[in-house]
Each structure stands twice: as C-alpha cells, then as structure tokens.
Image (tube, rainbow, N blue to C red):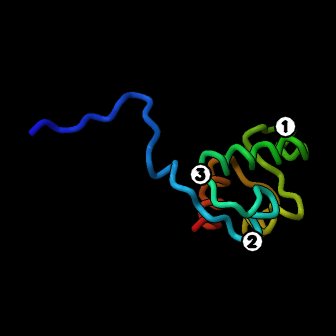
Amino acid sequence: MAEKKKRAGAPNSAFMKAMKPSEALAKIVGNEPLPRTEITKKLWEYIKKNNLQDAENRRNINADENLLVVFDGKKQVSMFEMTKLVNKHLS
C-alpha cells in the first residue's frame, strides 16, 4: 500500500481544530470555539488595536487589564511566551 503524503502547505489538522477559549481569553477573542490560527489572528488584532506591542522591542507584548489574566499576571511577555500562555487558555 502506498503511504499518503502530506501536500506542501496543507494546514496541520491540530491547528485547524476548533478550540474553546477560557473566560479570560474570550474577553479578547470572543467565546466561540475557533481554530488556533484564528485565535492568534484575533489576539494580534487586539494587540495592534490597543497599541500593546512594546515600542523599543517589538517582539514583546505589554499586557493590559484583559491580557494580564491570560499572561499569568506578567506585565510583559515575548511573542513566543505569549503563544505558550495562550495555549493554557484553550480546551
């Protein structure tokens, strides 16, 4: 039997699975289950709309009142740390 090969650029099904945001994250992205890609997109829209990217180091995100809860109380996190912290708020 021939193995199925993944097409180049095919979305990873784990990223496309709809995830339910926590109550804290829902204040930012809404409480509808969404794929991680859409949650990340909405999170960045929120960060840009509220000018939360650090002016000196654009890789850092400054937390506002809503993001403080999602970021485990940290006032500033890196983009990479943000992804890890947001994952804790998805089920």
Return the residue at label 2.
23
Tell me whether circle 1 and circle 2 mark residues in contact (CB < 8 Å): no
Q: How far is mark 3 from mark 1, CA to CA?
A: 28 Å
Of residue 57 and residue 27, the one placed in the foreground of this image is 27
Residue type (three-letter) at the residue carrying disc 2: Glu
Q: Residue 63's spot in the image, x, y percent?
A: 83, 57
Q: Is residue 55 left or right of residue 80?
A: right
Label 3 packing within 10 angstroms: few (<14), some (14-19), many (20+)? many
Residue at horizontal 76 percent and vertical 56 percent from the top: 29
Label 1 packing within 10 angstroms: few (<14), some (14-19), many (20+)? few
Residue at horizontal 70 percent and vertical 43 percent from the top: 41
Return the residue at label 1.
56
Residue type (three-letter) at the residue carrying disc 1: Glu
Q: Residue 21's spot in the image, x, y percent?
A: 67, 64
Q: Which of marks 2 and 3 is nearer the N terminus?
A: 2
- Relative to 61, residue 88 above or below: below
Q: Is residue 71 left or right of residue 47?
A: left
Return the residue at label 3.
36
Query: Which of the labelled discs sits on residue 6, or is there none?
Result: none
